[in-house]
Amino acid sequence: MKVKKIDKKNVSIAGFLLSILFFVLVAAVFFRGASTFSGKAKSEGEVTLRNAIARATVQCYAIEGRYPPSVEYLEEHYGIQIDRNRYYVFYEGFASNIMPDITVVPAEE
């Protein structure tokens, strides 16, 4: 019985190529996950900001007996922080005793 001799050069090239392929696959999975996470964080950021503004608006009504006249008032007196580079906030109040309409839209990047 004759034993075939394995060429070490071919084995090392195949191993190297397999390692490169595995690395590319892991990198692709990582970037896909990071992209998905970024999209979720962005949409959750909108919801979180809108909820924070709504809570501060109701708190202002409970304390002062009127809804705040603007978002700037909430920033100044109730600690709301808005990243104006990331979000546009539309705050439309009809009267001081009617809950204003609050809209948060992500800024185009």
Image: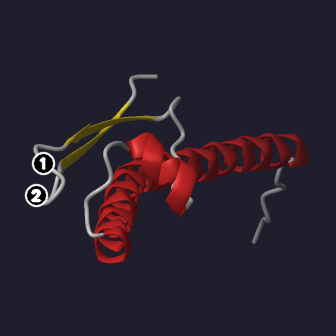
- Going by the numbered disc 1, the residue's amino acid type is Ala
Tag 2 secondary structure:
loop
Disc 1 crowd rating (10 Å Cα; few below 14, some 14-19, many 20+) is few
Using the image, tell me which numbered label, if any, was put on residue 40: none
- Going by the numbered disc 2, the residue's amino acid type is Ile
Q: How many marks?
A: 2
The percent position of residue 94, horizontal first and vertical second, equals 10, 43
Q: Is residue 8 depicted above or below 109 in this figure? A: below
Q: Quadrant of residue 92?
A: top left
Q: Is residue 63 depicted above or below 104 in this figure? A: below
Tag 1 secondary structure:
loop
Q: Quadrant of residue 45?
A: bottom left
Task: Looking at this view, name the residue that lies furthest to the front.
Answer: 65
Q: Are marks 1 and 2 in contact (CB under 8 Å)?
A: yes
Q: Looking at the figure, which quarter contains the N terminus?
A: bottom right
Please state if 88 lies on the left or on the right of 6 as rendered: left
The percent position of residue 15, horizontal first and vertical second, equals 77, 50
Question: Whole-Å distance between the Cαs marked 1 and 2?
Answer: 5 Å
Circle 1 residue = 95
Residue occupying image coordinates x 54% and y 40%: 83
Circle 2 residue = 98
Q: Is residue 96 depicted above or below 13 in this figure? A: below
